[in-house]
Image (spheres, coloured by chain):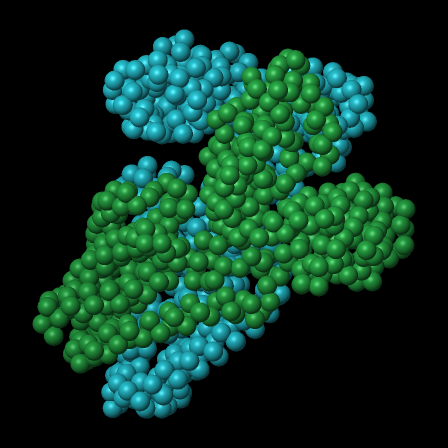
Chain colours: A cyan, B green
Amino acid sequence: MEEKIIEMIEGKKFGLLKETLSQMNPADLAPIFEEIEEKEIPVIFRILPKELAAEVFVEMDSDMQQFLIEAFSDKELREVMDELFMDDTVDIIEEMPANVAKRILKQTSVTTRKMINQLLAYPDDSAGSIMTTEYIDLEKHMTVDEAFDRIRKIGFESESIYTCYVTDRRRKLLGIVSVKDLLLNPKDCIIDDIMDENIIFANTLDDKEDVATQFEKYDLLAIPVVDKENRLVGIVTVDDAIDVIQEEASEDIEKMAAILPSEKTYLKTGVFETFKARIPWLLFLMISATFTGAIISSFESKLTACLALIAFIPMLMGTGGNSGSQSSVTVIRALSLGDIDFPDIFKVVWKELRVSVVCGVVLGIVNFIKLYLVDFLWLKTFDPGIELFEIITVCVTLVLVVIVAKLVGAILPIVAKKIGFDPAVMASPLVTTILDAVSLIIYFSIAASLLKI
Amino acid sequence: MEEKIIEMIEGKKFGLLKETLSQMNPADLAPIFEEIEEKEIPVIFRILPKELAAEVFVEMDSDMQQFLIEAFSDKELREVMDELFMDDTVDIIEEMPANVAKRILKQTSVTTRKMINQLLAYPDDSAGSIMTTEYIDLEKHMTVDEAFDRIRKIGFESESIYTCYVTDRRRKLLGIVSVKDLLLNPKDCIIDDIMDENIIFANTLDDKEDVATQFEKYDLLAIPVVDKENRLVGIVTVDDAIDVIQEEASEDIEKMAAILPSEKTYLKTGVFETFKARIPWLLFLMISATFTGAIISSFESKLTACLALIAFIPMLMGTGGNSGSQSSVTVIRALSLGDIDFPDIFKVVWKELRVSVVCGVVLGIVNFIKLYLVDFLWLKTFDPGIELFEIITVCVTLVLVVIVAKLVGAILPIVAKKIGFDPAVMASPLVTTILDAVSLIIYFSIAASLLKI
């Protein structure tokens, strides 16, 4: 498809091109502009029907949007901006450099500009920042027929028309009524009688992640957003909620991998930006790891007495780290999905304790079979220096390390959340670094007492 | 709220209870049943209005559903099942033991039973398995007014009424028309003239994750699902797409933490199940780690010559592991969001190479400052045995380890996906284990040549 379009552009078959592009979906059209030669971009964009052009514009990344805005005449810019929904306009302005943003604002009416500035003021992670101000509002004394008239009148400009919001004169939200309810009730029914007053709503300053969770829990298409005085100021639609869900999952995954979260896609993020997102944790974890080194150093004299013990360090640290991150990652995900919360900490500890004992014992036994029966007795791969006692030391350490790792891995994120830290940061790498040190201390302590070194 | 309800139940205030519960949202009501004494559960469930009861039933977990089904008379069971949408019925039957499933099927009509069996036959991760068969179908010669009549007639039984599907006599999908289009067009308009023939649709056997991605990309409320003969067989609604998105994110996160994915929530998963999900990777990684041990053993004689080198092993292995998992996790997420694909591999390698050189050099320099200037010259914390040369060895190793780690971490998932493996499995733990061995080999090789040991 893409190739055909590029061919049409090169062949200057603009008639055919217009017909083909008009049939396409904005989300499929936007990436095609990335493939077009720069000087052709504004030409092709102007071919699109007005409404489609605006939809394609929303789907483009901000570099392309900026390029186009700079190529637009004031009239063209105003035309595109007029077609956009308020939340998309705000998203675009947020990404633009100051002079471009100013030019966009200059092309909007005074009321729109006021609205935009209000929306721009909401914090980045708030419900207010993702809401749109175009929705269907009804009055409670209207009939179903009058409601349909209102939808027909303002429906063109509303992003989501399937849930209508009943407000009083002060814009206080009284109830909601779905188009389904309107369709399935007689035409002379009064809205007041059929509206649902038991409303799921959000406040402008609510965390957008919490708002997205409501969509999932209550299977909603839109959520009304009210201000401090309980006045309806906008709605969040399900498509934006899905974007938030994906963003938050990506953010959690990045934090679990010790990366500072970024909002751009992988290939769009520059080398230096990527470096900046990754280096802080790498530095911190590198410095922390020197403590683990210090533990080894302090046992150095004892290790000299039994050099074979060193070879087991990677296995013990690795298994401890893996066991711990299994627990921490599971707990972090459960926390962010709302499956568990602080009061469940004892249930979590009790469960992890039992799981860790079973895991630890199984790993210990398998390890003993491998080290003693296979390597020591059968294959005789060990140095003559190693004894049954040393193998037992390793296996006992392993069991203890797994138990401690799983408990630490499970408790840390819950406590972190309770005291106001981000649980995702408590994941793999930090837990692993802590567990590296703990594993070594357990190992050397057991070795010291069992082997009397 | 919950406490008040429990009080009402204990005080047997059933009138007040009925009123309170009827106002509540099914998603909030379902968890309350977990808190009620077992013998009271069916009593309270029977208090609920029929439609709400069915909605609450859908929100319950399968243990509670089974308990209730066993307490239902055949008539009650039939009443609840009649209210359910087809996709929910199928989900419930899938979770039930054979005898309970059989009893449910016995209470349904012959056509419904046939439909259920058909839906049960779709593979677990397919679009067919999450679709519902209740939707609004229109014919192309209908007028807008006739379309509304049809919606009023069958809308009660449809899960999603806002997108209507235009089919021919053989149920072939011709186009879609939204209720918004119907509302904003004159009443005598013919559907054929306003329907959209450029349809985003799925096949019954498509991966449900791919279908969910379409919702995100095209901002849809529902997607039609067609069979091999292009006949419309059902629709997937946006609420189910959100569930799939969350499940898939959880699954990716679990795989990245070396856990076999599970569908249950954390606290609902038993100890033995949790153990089974975690032990395979722990065992595999433990055995793999013994190779790392073997590398240390094989260098043992050389290490004896320079025991101080051992203390740096955890820092080098840790930094290598962290650098690698940063890259692998970023690449895996980008793959699963569709931001990159196999043809982008060279772009990815080129980017990671540059990022890794910058990260590696910065880490190397900081490490040199810490080891040489702070520890060695200033604090003098090192054994007399250590020399500038050894510190340089450690820092050079660090730079190389970071570069190799980031490249391996980025390439492995892309290659894994290309050859048909799950990229998420290539994440942290497996990459870390591979990098542990690689880091040690680099370390000892550099040490051997630089220090001539």
How far across and how far down the image is residue A321, in percent? 40, 66
Asked if residue A443 lies left or right of residue B262, the reply is: left
Return the residue nearer the eye: B226 or B26.
B226
Q: Is residue B390 above or below residue A385?
A: above
Q: Is residue A175 above or below residue A270?
A: above
Q: How many marks?
A: 0
- State which quadrant residue B191 falls in: top right
How far across and how far down the image is residue A136, in percent? 65, 22
Q: Is residue A164 above or below residue B410?
A: above
Return the residue nearer the eye: A331 or B248.
B248
Decide if residue A166 is in sight here.
no
- State which quadrant residue B444 falls in: bottom left
How far across and how far down the image is residue B270, in percent? 60, 67
Decide if residue A307 is in sight here.
yes
Asked if residue A15 lies left or right of residue B199, the reply is: left
- State which quadrant residue B267 falls in: bottom right
Q: Residue at x 35, y 18 (%)?
A: A17
Q: Is residue B316 above or below residue A40?
A: below
Q: Residue at x 16, y 77 (%)?
A: B302
Q: Residue at x 69, y 15 (%)?
A: A149
Residue that sits furthest to the front in the current view: B170
How far across and how far down the image is residue A363, in percent? 44, 77
Question: Quadrant where the N terminus of chain A lies?
Answer: top left
Question: Quadrant where the C terminus of chain A lies?
Answer: bottom left
Asked if residue B210 lies left or right of residue A62, the reply is: right
